[in-house]
Amino acid sequence: MVRRGEHAVVLGASMAGLLAARVLADSYDRVTVVERDRLGTGDEPRRGVPQGKHVHALLPSGSAALEVLFPGVLAELVSGGTKVVEDYTEFYFSVGGNRLSSEVQPRVLTYLPTRPRLEGAVRDRVRALPRVRFADGNDVVGLVSDETRRRVLGVRIMARAAGSAEEVLAADLVVDAMGRGTRTPTWLRGLGYEMPAEESVSVHMGYSSVSVRLRPGTEPEKLVLIGPAPDRPRGMALFATEDDTWLFTATGYRGHHPSTSFAEMVDGVAGFAPPRVVDALRHAEPLSEVVTYRYDANRRRRYDRVRRFPRGLIVLGDALCGFNPIYAQGMSVAALQAVALRDCLRDSGDDLERRFFRAAAEPVGVAWRLAVGADLTQPLVEGPRPLPIRLVNRYVRHLLDVGRHDPVVATQFLLVSALLDHPARLLRPGIIARVLRGTARPERVEGVSAQRVPVR
């Protein structure tokens, strides 16, 4: 392993920040994680994760990356009660109004940890690293640079207790993992740099979630996921959680945000969810209050395209790119970015920052195109729809229709949506031919290893 320096500082104990700390600990003598929240030792929802009580999904690509960074963590989650989709008859997946073939078998495992349980397990692993310490209960005030402003030398922080004074943490590398609240663009402007170009698509997505106990004998598949359709701006998710309860989330685009009443949430999904799922929910016992969450826009900051950028600073996670949460890409893309950072750190070459942004742009770009392309099928989402997007979305609509009865097409779509295969795989001649024929002829599906991490 290449030694990069004495001290690295990570801003934010988000999933992205924790994963960054893990890979930095291999290349720096010390790693400090600065976090505004006070971090407990359990897996209770963290205040800085307002969406923490809602349905989260860990894509197979994300779980594979986690296992690479923390060997044994998946087995640890399962031993703690996390459910696993091993056979895709345990997964009801409807996308764009099409329930994909129940014969689909991508031969990968899908883990279903709740966000607090997953973050708690990862945080415990990071805490156990001898080179890492947490400076929780601290606000980040700003960056410290050299006189030329060409290199970041550290950060200024301040404890949240009354009467606290600023403290400077000197660092060879600062990693911004502060999520959507990132202040790096503003800090860059203060240092005389151009702010990165931003791409954004407003979605105005609303969530309502509640923990429930299902009546014995009414349990559906371990994971029920129904996305919005072009003629239906609402969706839902229901999945089995660690303590044999279930988490129910209803979603909706602007003007169609779900209710804050459990009974009305169930009524809201009754028109498109399978009758057996609706019946299970109508007889379920709510175990919590309904919690809500609002997400305004997909936003991608193009650090990979900036002409000038200071040394000693990296941005990752939602601070780099945030996606509509209904596609469950955030944690998995953060894990793929962490793997990209690890690979860049292992190379002794200079210009770490630029090499990382270029490497991270690959998984980020794939997820961005998938999310934005899907959002733009929704009439309520405003944004340009140039001819290439319209043509691709038309093809995907037909592909999904064929995927209702063709397990080969359905499997390929699942591998792409899980970020295990590049979207170009949907345009292979064999897949195009099946889509055009609309055939249901059985065919052997190419296998994929659960340890397959990079998006190629």
Image: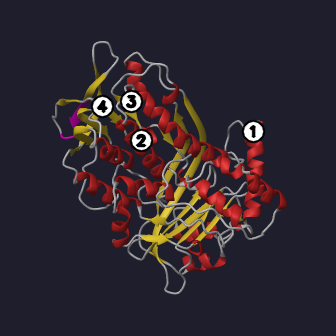
Q: Which residues are magenta?
A: 156-161
Tell me the distance, in whole angstroms, between the alpha carbons under discs 1 and 4.
40 Å
Q: CA distance from mark 1 to mark 3?
A: 34 Å
Mark 3 lies on a secondary structure that is: helix
Residue 374 in sight here: no
Asked whether residue 69 appears in the rendered view, the answer is yes
Q: CA distance from mark 2 to mark 1?
A: 31 Å
**Residues under numbered marks 3 and 4 in contact, where contact means CB atoms less than 8 Å apart:** yes
Q: Which mark is residue 179?
A: 2
* Dot 1 or dot 4, earlier in sequence: 4
Q: Residue at x 74, y 45 (%)?
A: 392
Q: Amino acid at mark 4?
A: Leu
Disc 3 from disc 4: Cα separation:
10 Å
Q: Quadrant of residue 97?
A: bottom right
Residue bearing the label numbered 3: 352
SS at circle 2? helix
Query: Would you name the residue on which mark 4 appears?
Result: 173
Query: Which of the two marks, 3 or 4, is nearer to us in this view?
Result: 3
Rendering coords of residue 391 (x, y %): 78, 44
Point out the frontmost of discs 2 and 1: 1
The residue lying toward the viewer, choosing from 234 and 41, is 41
Quadrant of the rendered structure where residue 92 is? bottom right
